[in-house]
Amino acid sequence: MRAARMFRTEARVQFRERVWFVSGAVSLAMAAVLLVIDGGASRAAAPYVLLLEVCTVGIIFAASLTLLDQTTGVFAALSTTPRGVRAYVPARVGTLTTLSVALAVIIGAAGAHGWFAVLPVVVAVGLTALLFDALSVAIAARSPSLFGFLSAAPWLMVPLLGAPLTWAIFGLDVPLLRLVPTIGSWELLQAGYTPVPTGWLLADAAYLAVWAAGAFFVAVRTIAAADNAGRLPAPAAAPRRRARPPRRAPRRLVLASIDAASAFRNPLTLTIAVSPLVLAAAVRFGLPPLQAWLWHAHGVQAAGFQPLIFSGVILLHVPYILGAVATLLLLDDLDEGGLRALSVSPLGVRGYLSYRTASTALAALLAVIAATFIAGPPAGMGWQRLGLAWLLAAGCAALVPLTTATLANNRVHGFGILKVLGIVYYLPLAAWALHQWAPVAGALPTYWPAALAWGGHSPDTLILALAGSGIVALIAIAETPLGRRHLLRRSYAG
């Protein structure tokens, strides 16, 4: 297969899976925000958006497409073509990197509000996206499942993103940190908006290019090894041993027992399970010193934003984490054939979707209650509002897997939907400043649990309770039959 044809095929696959549409929509929304905010704030925020969003846009898509190819036997098919396996990584990584560079030009120009040096930004985004995308392909090719990838990837991605953020926010000009290649990415991104010595930029670009080339080489070797591993030797005969018959769980608890067993075997699941408690502790013990630092270093008085922080972190982010985990489990079952088996079982797709949404709501409710007691509620938020906020937050968490079940065909679609839902989920927080636009924000279900923590920035408690529960219930009632039909159709199409 010629390289040009491989690139065209990869572009068609990504277009069909709506990778470009989702990434473009999210990036254009961020560019619009940068255009409307103050010029100084926009120029300060643009490098962060370019690093955290544009450079990383291909990470999850590169991984999900590679995992999908493993499941559908694409590697085996490519091994029969002259250049199939060798052109696989250049086509995938090259297409996603091109997408990142195109989005970088749009977002970079939108954040400039004036003078903008496009060349260092393009170099930074191109090399950093190549580094991240190649690493994602390599990790996904060695991962047995989606959760396997998500368990391994943060060990590389978090330091690569955390180092430049630490460098930028706290001004840690430590020579040892320069060993991390993304420090060079940050300086190149900064050069798009403020002058930086050319010598530093050339050194940063060269060092970053070496790392990107190394990641690309590792990805190519890993894909070739994964293709060769398709012909495994027959396993040696194990000595026969009388197996203890498995203890049968009640039919309604089968999925719960499977999820519990998977959670104890998977460190990522356990980490996510305790992350709400860690976030709550960070709000309780980290927020006061952060507020003091903002006041002394920048003159920013952040004490009055405690209700907004509580609603964003505890009432929205904690439930969204659990909703996203439930969605990942659903996508794994969809792509790995679990739903096809369940569709002919007594439980059925109807029971599966009911379990997935109900268990998500219950887990979110327990997590939000625990996080509230650790972080502490805002002053003046009574128990009545607090209880209503817990229930509405749990209902919003259940809508995440339910919406994904209604729309997603596979992991790639699901990740795109999660990306868009992530923006929609937190969008009502803008109503804190624009509370006169509450009727518009109220169309989104996550506005109502968040507004219950805002005191004078929100309507009456009774209005919040009735409107919030009505909107959450209306969306759930509309999406449940659609989700069942879609999952049943996809399980037979699998």
Image (cartoon, grey):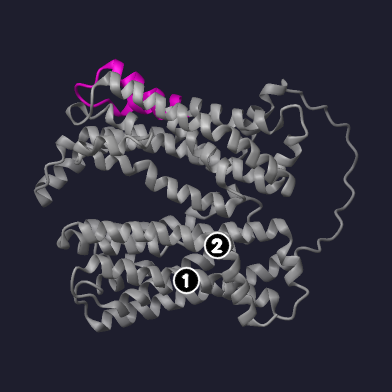
Q: Residue at x 43, y 68 (%)?
A: 100
- Residue closest to the eye, 110 or 383: 110
Give residue 45's position: percent from left, percent from top.
24, 59
Q: Is residue 386 magenta?
A: yes
Q: Where, by quadrant of the figure, is residue 105 drawn?
A: bottom left
- SS class of the residue under badge 2? helix
Q: Is residue 134 magenta?
A: no
- Residue closest to the eye, 367 or 197: 367
Residues in magenta, as a range: 364-393
Above or below residue 135? Residue 360 is above
Disc with the residue nearer the chain's start (1 vs 2): 2
- SS class of the residue under badge 1? helix
Above or below residue 332? Residue 363 is above
Q: Residue at x 40, y 65 (%)?
A: 55
Q: Can you tell which mark lies on residue 97?
A: 1
In the image, 175: left or right of 370? left
Dot 1: within a 10 Å radius of its alpha carbon, few (fewer than 14), some, or many (20 or more) residues?
many
Above or below residue 479? Residue 3 is below
Q: Residue at x 25, y 74 (%)?
A: 191
Amino acid at circle 1: Thr
- Residue closest to the eye, 27 or 478: 478
CA distance separating discs 1 and 2? 10 Å
- Residue closest to the eye, 270 or 60: 60
In the image, 227: left or right of 147? right
Name the main secondary structure of what is drawn in magenta.
helix
Q: Which residue is mark 2?
A: 62
Q: Residue at x 31, y 40 (%)?
A: 428
